[in-house]
């Protein structure tokens, strides 16, 4: 007889002040492993939160036949109260003392887990967690969940931010733990779930739309979206020819060398991909260009035709740059609307007031409409999905109309349609602008990318641009 671990019978739930997943009938039987798919904002993460008993049952019956301590989770922002820190703090060696280390976060007392070794995390055990790269932080969360030896493992955007080697290892690990009794439910893009998945469900408007066995799911080509581009502003006039030039740049923390004698010349109008494994130093390199790293003054760096440290302010640099990174939405914890957050980015200096023009307001509206986010433009940034948040941050960078865009894994959590729209828009937008684009997925790179810097273990070299497999949307 079927003895499900979780069973919903005509159940409905409430998230904050709104009903979600009304009249839901679903069960998790023993031996099943589920992938939850759907567009951004469709309710994928919310459904995992319901399974984790985070939202009130207001209708029908929801039975949880598994103790809560037998469930482990991996969410994008687990483990840190970001209200306590500021974005640039991880680059300051003297301002991270006392912050939780990887070892303490994982509560390691004795033996080192094999997963830490396989994921190249062993050298990071005594590093403060805010100093980890996006991918390293995600690996740490996964290891923490595995150490719990859970009966049920909930994984939200599991592969986001992980390099190819880590994705392969994690997929193999899921197969291994499934063989010893752990059941897995994860959010995933259509067709992008690992082999361990046995069943797939789709969410639409916070409802379960379809549930099938994984072997019955056939890849469906994405229909081409016929959507006019927004009216793009003219690229601003510039008075520089070099965006950045690094001459033997080296960054060290104690005896640890993060960047080792980097040579990189970015001319205005060039389109660069910045690639390399998790923890290679990509974000550190970008922090030097975006005026976030204090060791820039100890190196030979030219930004916008000026020697770094020759009298320019950090705001002079930030004014010329539109910036997106995986951590930005984690540090934006205030309860403000998406539109307010976008408009706050119009000026590089957050302490100066900027009078928003009618053209800027219209461009923001057109961008929200282009990405089908008009309905959330007035919503609290904290209450929309991760994919919608990251799309909003991309809109924030574009509305600023800068001559330079630095996009560090900008498509994290975005569905295939939004990625395809963003790639097309960036190709048009960057015709007379400079672009630096970071991604672990070659298929995410805009077509306009024509140069590639590869970095690993602190050393960099120019390589051919990775072959592209464009998204179809």
Image: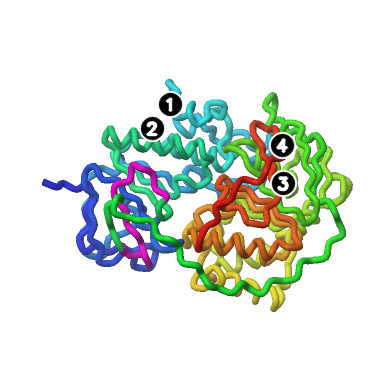
SS for callout 4: strand
Is 107 on the left or on the right of 177, as rendered? Answer: right
Question: Which residue is pictured at 70% across the width and 76% down the height?
Answer: 359
Residue to which mark 3 is pinned: 292
Q: Quadrant of residue 447?
A: bottom right
Q: Nearer the viewer, residue 464 or 134?
A: 464
Q: Which residue is mark 2?
A: 147
- Magenta residues: mostly which secondary structure? loop
Residue at 70 percent of width and 51 percent of height: 450
Residue under circle 1? 113
Circle nearer the N terminus (2, 1) = 1
The answer to whether 165 is drawn above or below residue 375 in the figure is above
Left or right of 247, for residue 215: left
Residue positioned 76% across, 36% down in the render: 262
Q: In terms of image quadrants, where is residue 248? A: top right
Residue 29 covered by magenta stretch: no
The CA distance from mark 2 to mark 3 is: 35 Å
Q: CA distance from mark 4 to mark 3?
A: 23 Å
Q: Could you tell me which secondary element the residue under label 2 belongs to? A: helix
Of badges 4 and 1, the one in the foreground is 4
Residue at position x 60%, y 70% from top?
Answer: 367
Number of the label disc, if any, that sits on residue 461? 4
**Start and end of the magenta stretch?**
192-209
Mark 1 or mark 3, earlier in chain? 1
Per the model, the C-alpha gap separating discs 4 and 2 is 37 Å
Q: Residues within 10 Å of mark 3 (few under 14, many from 20)?
A: some
């Amino acid at each position: 007889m079927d003895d499900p671990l979780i069973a919903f019978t005509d159940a409905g739930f409430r998230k904050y002040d709104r009903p979600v997943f009304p009249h839901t009938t679903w069960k998790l039987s023993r031996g099943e492993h589920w992938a939850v798919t759907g567009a951004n904002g469709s309710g994928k993460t919310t459904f995992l939160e319901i399974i984790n008993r985070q939202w009130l049952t207001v209708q029908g019956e929801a039975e949880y036949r598994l103790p809560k301590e037998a469930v482990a989770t991996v969410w994008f922002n687990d483990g840190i109260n970001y209200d306590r820190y500021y974005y640039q703090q991880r680059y300051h060696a003297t301002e991270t003392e006392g912050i939780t280390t990887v070892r303490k976060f994982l509560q390691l007392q004795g033996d080192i887990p094999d997963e830490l070794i396989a994921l190249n995390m062993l050298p990071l055990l005594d590093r403060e967690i805010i100093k980890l790269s996006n991918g390293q932080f995600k690996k740490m969360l996964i290891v923490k969940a595995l150490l719990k030896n859970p009966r049920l493992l909930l994984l939200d955007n599991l592969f986001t931010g992980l390099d190819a080697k880590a994705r392969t290892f994690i997929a193999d690990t899921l197969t291994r733990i499934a063989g010893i009794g752990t059941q897995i439910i994860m959010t995933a893009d259509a067709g992008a779930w690992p082999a361990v998945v046995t069943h797939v469900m789709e969410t639409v408007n916070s409802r379960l739309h379809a549930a099938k066995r994984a072997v019955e799911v056939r890849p469906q080509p994405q229909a081409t979206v016929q959507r006019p581009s927004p009216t793009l502003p003219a690229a601003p006039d510039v008075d520089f020819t070099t965006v950045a030039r690094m001459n033997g740049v080296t960054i060290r923390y104690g005896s640890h060398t993060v960047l080792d004698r980097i040579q990189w010349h970015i001319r205005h109008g060039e389109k660069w991909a910045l690639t390399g494994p998790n923890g290679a130093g990509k974000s550190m390199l970008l922090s030097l260009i975006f005026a976030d790293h204090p060791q820039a003054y100890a190196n030979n760096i030219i930004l916008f035709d000026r020697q770094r440290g020759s009298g320019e302010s950090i705001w002079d640099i930030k004014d010329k740059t539109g910036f997106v990174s995986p951590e930005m939405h984690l540090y934006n914890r205030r309860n403000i609307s998406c539109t307010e957050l976008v408009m706050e980015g119009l000026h590089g200096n957050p302490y100066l007031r900027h009078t928003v023009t009618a053209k800027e307001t219209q461009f923001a509206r057109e961008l929200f409409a282009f990405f089908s986010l008009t309905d959330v433009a007035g919503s609290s940034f904290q209450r929309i999905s991760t994919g919608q948040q990251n799309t909003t941050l991309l809109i924030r960078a574009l509305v600023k109309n800068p001559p330079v865009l630095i996009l560090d894994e900008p498509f994290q959590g975005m569905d295939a349609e939004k990625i395809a729209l963003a790639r097309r828009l960036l190709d048009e937008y960057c015709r007379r602008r400079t672009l630096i684009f970071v991604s672990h997925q070659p298929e995410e790179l805009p077509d306009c990318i024509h140069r590639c810097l590869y970095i690993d273990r602190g050393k960099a070299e120019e390589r051919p641009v990775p072959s592209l497999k464009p998204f179809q949307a």
